[in-house]
Amino acid sequence: MKLKTTLLASVIALAPMAAMAADLTIGFSQIGSESGWRAAETTVTKQEAEKRGIDLKFADAQQKQENQIKAIRSFIAQGVDAILIAPVVATGWDEVLEEAKDAEIPVVLLDRTVDADESLYLTAVTSDLVHEGEVAGQWLVDEMNGEDCRIVELQGTTGSSPAIDRKTGFEQGIEGHDNLEIVRSQTGDFTRAQGKVVMESFLKAEGGENICALYAHNDDMAVGAIQAIKEAGLKPGEDIRIVAIDAVPDAHKAIADGEMNATIELTPNMAGPALDALEAYLADGTEPEKWIQTESRLFTADDDNMAIFNEKKDLGY
Amino acid sequence: MTDTLTPDAPVLHARGISKFFPGTIALDDVELRLMPGEVHALLGENGAGKSTLIKCLTGAYRRDAGTMLMDGQEIHPVSTADSQRLGIGTVYQEVNLLPNLTVAENLFLGRQPMRGGFIARRRMNEEARAVLAGYGLRIDPAEPLTAYSVAIQQVIAIARAVEMSGKVLILDEPTASLDHDEVQLLFDVIRQVKARGLAVVFITHFLDQVFAISDRATVLRNGRVVGECLLAEMTQRDVVTMMLGRQLEARTKARDVGPAGKTLVEIDDLGKRGMMAPFSLNIREGEVVGLAGLLGSGRTETANLIFGVEPADQGRIALRGQDISIKNPRDAVAHRFALCPEDRKIDGIVGDLSVRDNIILALQARQGWMRPIPRAKVEEIAQSYVRALDIRLASLDMPIRLLSGGNQQKALLARWLATNPAFLILDEPTRGIDVGAHAEIIALIEQLRADGMALLVASSELEELVAYSTRVVVLRDRQQVRELTGDQITPDNIINAIATEEVA
Amino acid sequence: MTSQTIGPRPSVLRRILPQLVILAVALALNVAVFPEFFQIDFRNGRLFGNLIDVLNRGAPVALLCIGMTLVIATKGIDLSVGAVMAIAGAVAASVVVDGHGWGTALLAALAAGGLCGLWNGLLVAVLRIQPIVATLVLMVAGRGIAQLVTEGKILTFDNPGLIHLGAGTVAGVPTPILIWLALGALVTFVVRKTALGMLIEAIGINERSSRLAGINSRVLLVCVYLVSGLCAALAGVIVAADIKGADANNAGLWLELDAILAVVIGGNSLLGGRFSIIASLIGALIIQSVNSVILLSGLPPEFNLVIKALLILGILVIQSPRIGNYIYLLKASGPQPEPDAPASSPTKEETAR
Amino acid sequence: MIRSTHLPLLITLATFVLAYALCASAYPAMLSLRVVANLLTDNAFLGIAAVGMTFVILSGGIDLSIGSVIAFTGVFLAVILRETSIHPLAAFALVLLLTTAFGTAMGATIHYLEMPPFIVTLAGMFLARGAAYVLSTESVPITHEFYDTLQGLYWKIDGARFRLIGGLMVLTFIVGALVAHRTRFGQNVYALGGGEQAAKLMGVPVARTTIGIYAVSGGLAGLSGIVFSLYTSAGYSLATVGVELDAIAAVVIGGTLLTGGYGFVAGTFFGILIMGLIQTYIVFDGTLSSWWTKIVIGSLLFAFILLQKGLTWAAKKRAAQARMRTATGSAALS
């Protein structure tokens, strides 16, 4: 009898562990695969889940919020243990998060946060998009050191939150420095091709020699722009300084080649901290911080970019 | 042929109607008087201005001069809908009704019985049934229109026009695609409409039909009225003379068949399940084989099977003793077969292409795209056929859809003659074309035969078949029932063959 | 009207005049916002200038609209070209990444594009599925296939031969310009010097009649979709080569709409029939000039779409058959009648019998 | 009596039932009421827009602008509710007026300038999206208590919530079906799809009907935008990109021919449900990568088209045989 109770007790005690080891099912609603960084985030998330023995249900939303909402509702109907969302946009999550809460399924936000009551989600693992822009601006302020500089800006997709926040952040970063001026700003849709096309038009509209720096909202556009600058017979990284955000492998390579000056890392490993927090929460109810901020590290020519490139290149960027 | 006493007041009186197109005068001071309770034939060759006049009456065109009085009131219809409201209903040869709607929906489109803001469908169906019963049709009006034959569709169109308008009914070649019995069905309906006191305008190329049903006629030539007459006082010859302005030479019944040539095409048990029972047919060079039968008896199906439009699933075809395989029209063309199809608009012309391109199309298709026919050669071919067949056009560059029906038909004949065919199949070659072109095409058939070509001609006009056929094959229920040769070929015999039950 | 093999050739110039005028206006707008628009330098071994950019950046749409013109002439439409571009780019990139030469990569990409075209053609010609639905399938699935090839990454490469196709120059002229000019000329030549053009038009106007006249409409239909696929593949290779990487998710995104627009601006009817590749190519340049105005104007990007929509609407309204008829009527008040209404004019009912 | 004309509708219905049965056999949880409620709620905006698209396609046209109009509506509502103090109901009325006018303008352009709908609505698509950008590029949250009230209206059983917007969609479908089959306007739409020339000759007011159709489509896109704003409590100019293609796909899967004239509003309803089912299944499965998702959706679309093609072909063949029987019958009669 006693043995039996002990056994039972130990089984109960072990249950969360067992659940974690084998039976934990987590739904992950990813935005899509619109950029290399996004693909890397998906890869890393899957790796992290596999590492922990979690059954990850992956749903790709093809860049549509409605598909994400549908996916979350389906996760709830399916009865998963927790949900990860990389929200495509900040607004519009209250209703569905409430349903998740009703069903007692914890939700963790990845890489972007939402405009909803904090009680509706467990935690958000994100970088600070505005901060990233600020770091870029700050870098340029230091680099120019009071010299006059006409800047061109390649924005992300019009209306997307990284485009808006990184623009705001950069403007904050260079605020108060009258030597720095953004002379042209146009969307490059976060893509290499558009980045190159728009840079071409900047070079002609302003004259390549009149542009001193380029700020791109992501590395892909910067990589495209580098080619445009080269084709115009200028030296990227020297004639025109280039700073961008994301720190994808190709950006490290460009910095190593001296064609780019700086990039700010947005780590694709949002899932690691998120899953850690979730496991802790499911195991014994440990409430994590509401915001787990990832580091926005600045990389310049001073770093060993080739090494970082080799390290990152297989992550699915 | 009832006698008509001209009543005192026309229901519709159009006076001094003129219509100009850039460069041409389509109608010049035309007068048309329609009396209640009469069938009024509007006659004239293609291009005489019949269609233009009708379009002016129905508001499709704005007249450039003249007045229209409806019951003494001047009217100015600006659209077909408008003229319908004023009391002028029209039934065209084609595009009358909507194939995707039911019979009742077609009948009541735009004036459906309503209840509480919604269409009362059941009542609509009941009313449709009642209306159609009044025309002798007992059909389910909730079925799609396409469930019924063309003749029945035509009656439905007439019923719609009469119910909607109620004063004038214009029938623009309503019988063009009907066979003999269906025409009779239609005539019964026209007589009922007439009895209701409507004025019926009847346009057709079949003079027999004109005399069978019409009381009076207005004849147009070159946009002018050449005469208005009581048909009871006229002969067909008089009318044709008025229309053409010259005496049409009597059709010769050349029954002296030349020496029959060698057998060109042998068809053995060719057939397709669900479409046509297997049939056999031999055709020699210098021979015209006529295909007779009612609509739906398998005339067109026979032509389509031989030409590979529908691949046969049994039987064989041999050309000059050699078995050939025809799986599609391309194979047929490669063996120098040619087919002038029944439905010119759908199967024949390529509307937006120029007349020149239309004439050269089949020859070019046979040559393949790699070997374009040199420009000069094309011009020469097109010109020569335009001359030989007397195709009337402003320019070879004009899109063929702008030509009249008869000229389109001749251009299609030119298309096939340009390929120098050994075996020419003509499916209803004279349907819907005017008297002059009609005679020319019959003469052409005679001449092609004399030149040693083998022809297979399907037609619903028995007189015509009798005129040019050296043999006539009679079809019924998608089977061959009789073959008539030599002196056996008379309209009576053909009708007898169609009417008798047993299969030969 | 359209130039033709057969019959005396009514002036090609007259057919494309409206497009040329619109192009001139669009270029003038560019000059208005950026006076040095026409300035061309020779810099860094290549021609350098805004006009060159318009020609160069117009290359993908120009290539797409060569095939699209033929497809539309047969009364079809090809919504899949953008996705096919992505597939072709991905295939080319993965082949060079695997260490093969650029020639192999180009051939592989063309083969992939051809296969896609063949698939569309078979659906349309053999299974008789409406073109817009048939090509929707590949439009939806194609980008997925492209990502399958690249495994979701931007597949970068540094094969100079391949890069040359997108970013290189020949005698100072960017290669893409030469490619689309050459292909445009080649296809126009083939279509007009053989009977192909007429046969395609015949199919587009009345397929049944054409088939009965002995035209192998099935094979021709498959062929035009095949050509469209090949053109899309070439465009895809150029776009990938231009950025030295295959971006499966973004390459050619929504370009099918631009290509269709270019064909329509070129005065070709979506209802099939008479066509002019030259006019479509000018249409592509018009679109690129509009894009260039937007970029050069320096207005905030929020206004891009509104400006583009308004400019395009203006162009289309000017070209509308109704307005065209109106202008024609004004002109035709003289005694010289010409049966030369636009081929697209659907006013069949109103033409005298 | 089941008429041959209803066959496509029955096929769609049968496909839906079959597909649901297959999904449920793989994942029994798909039978839960939650999934049913989700299907209604999550597809509400798409369904409403698809009703408009059905009318457009029935008439032989196409409307590419609806996705953009939905986004514009959302942004417009969000901005106007943020900037002014007008009541949401008034804002709804205003935006419906605007989008209906927009549709009317497109319809008028299509009719009077004789321009192809594909191109006119493509320009409309750019214009509406552009207008949304001009209003606001950022996603604007809507925080009005009336919105909370509306969102609070649901019927909850077993954790499943049947929300107002799902009901609104069903209502729209019912009204749409009534309008299509039981009003003169609806009949005129079918008539246009059957053949514009014939319709014109039969006195169908082509101008009024064409313009009306696009007005309805614009208005329903506006309604769909309102529903979408309720669904997400926000207006976002990048929302609902490509929804027009989803709507077209739903209409096609629902058995309506893109050439016009044949189809049912009710068919579109099942088209929407089938598409929703596919998505739910993919999420339940949860192993497909981003690219495989696209490929699977494309393949399923293809499978549906093939199925429909096959059934239509079989039905046609049967009809041809029937016709042959009646033809020979009438010949015998005469």
Image (cartoon, coloured by chain):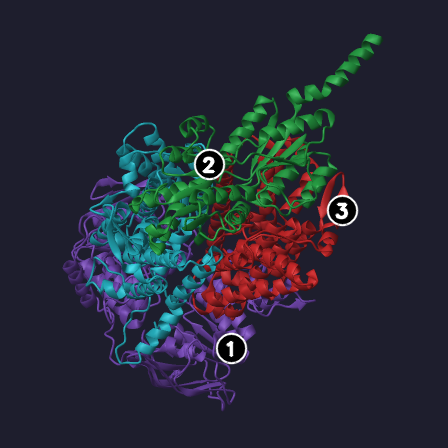
Chain colours: A green, B purple, C cyan, D red
The residue closer to the viewer here, D272 or B308, is D272
Q: In which quarter of the image is residue C104?
A: top left
Q: Distance between the residues labelled 1 and 3?
A: 53 Å
Reading the image, the residue beneath label 1 is B82
- Kindly report which numbered mark, 1 or 3, lies closer to the viewer in this rendering: 3
Residue at x 58%, y 54% (from the top left corner): D49
In the rendered image, the vertical position of residue C324 relative to residue C109, given as above or below: below
| Percent of width and height locating residue A117 | 70, 44
Q: Which mark is residue D155?
A: 3
In the rendered image, the vertical position of residue C66 relative to residue A10, given as above or below: below
Tally of marks: 3
Q: Which mark is residue B134?
A: none
| Percent of width and height locating residue B54 | 41, 77
Q: Is the residue at mark 2 from the same chain as the one at mark 3? A: no
Q: Are marks 1 and 2 in contact (CB under 8 Å)?
A: no
| Percent of width and height locating residue B139 | 57, 60
| Percent of width and height locating residue C16 | 28, 63
Quadrant where the N terminus of chain B is found in the figure: bottom left
Residue at x 68%, y 30% (from the top left corner): A81
Query: Regarding mark 1 in the picture, which secondary structure is present there?
Result: helix
Q: Quadrant of residue B22?
A: bottom left
